[in-house]
Image (cartoon, rainbow, N blue to C red):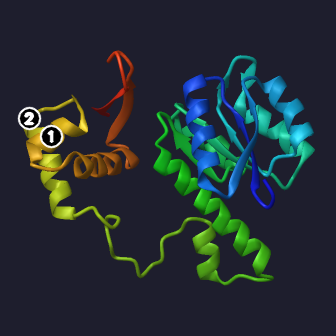
Amino acid sequence: MKNKTRVMILEDDVRASYTLESTVNHHGKFQVVAVSETCAEAIEQFKLYTPDLVFVDITLPDGNGLNVIKKLRELSDSCHFIMTTAVRETTVVEKAVQLGVIDYLVKPIRMSRVNQALDDYLKSIETFRNNATVDQAGIDSLLGKNPTTQTRRTPKGIDTATLERLRDRINELRLTEFSAEEVGQIMDFSRITARRYLEYLESEGTLKLELDYNTGGRPRRVYKML
């Protein structure tokens, strides 16, 4: 665990906790040192393990994750926090931002999104540690601002015309719930390509991803229109 970033997880959902723990440990530069299911347990483990980064759920059996962050900040002002929650209300997101959380992950959480959050954390920490000062571009990058010269509307791997065609087909067929496999058949995509476009639509708030565990085996990923 030498030189690895110490991570603590506060999550009462066993499946979500396991997914987070396995993803973080698989990254290579992070190590989960503690997993808590309650606010009280989290405070005690925080004192014991002094993590660098904490994943915090909002809805917990004995309290609210936002209040836990306030208490943990009193114990350490150098720790960073990432929210992991199904709560989407803008008032809650605003409070989280005011508390200084560095990321906000909406459940069900994708492993790729967790890895992105971890990479962003490492990038920011490296900038803080290796530079005495930072220019405007560096500050914009740390704050997640897009450069003014950026003209690309969609990320690499997402073609704008294809994306619009997918939107049109969903509206035309009046689809409200579907899988990547079903979209792949409709659009003549591979399952992987369909999932990439659906994950993009989810990230911009058009779709919601849910896991169907009533399959008798591996959970089925279902996308629903918002």
* Rendering quarter of residue 60: top right
Residue that mark 1 sits on: 170
Q: Are marks 1 and 2 in contact (CB under 8 Å)?
A: yes
Percent position (x, y) of residue 86? Answer: 52, 31
In the image, residue 190 sits, relative to residue 223, either above or below, namely below
Density class for disc 1 (Cα within 10 Å; few <14, some 14-19, many ≥20) is some
Q: Is label 2 in a helix, a strand or a loop?
A: loop
Percent position (x, y) of residue 39? Answer: 78, 26
Give the residue displayed 70% in from the left and 37% down from the top.
9
Q: Is residue 82 left or right of residue 212?
A: right
Disc assigned to residue 188: none
In the image, residue 78 sits, relative to residue 36, either above or below, namely below
Q: Is residue 136 left or right of residue 180?
A: right
Give the residue displayed 61% in from the left and 31% down from the top.
17
Q: Is residue 111 left or right of residue 120?
A: left
**Mark-to-mark CA distance, 1 and 2:** 5 Å
Quarter the C terminus occupies:
top left
Residue nearest the observer in this picture, 222 or 93? 222
* Rendering quarter of residue 163: bottom left
Residue that mark 2 sits on: 173
Q: Is residue 46 left or right of residue 97?
A: right
Q: Amino acid at mark 1?
A: Ile
Percent position (x, y) of residue 154? Answer: 32, 64
Q: Is label 1 in a helix, a strand or a loop?
A: helix
Density class for disc 2 (Cα within 10 Å; few <14, some 14-19, many ≥20) is few
Percent position (x, y) of residue 204? Answer: 37, 49
Q: Amino acid at mark 2?
A: Leu
Residue nearest the observer in this picture, 85 or 70? 85
In the image, residue 178 sits, relative to residue 30, either above or below, namely above
Give the residue displayed 66% in from the left and 41% down from the top.
95
Total of numbered circles in the picture? 2
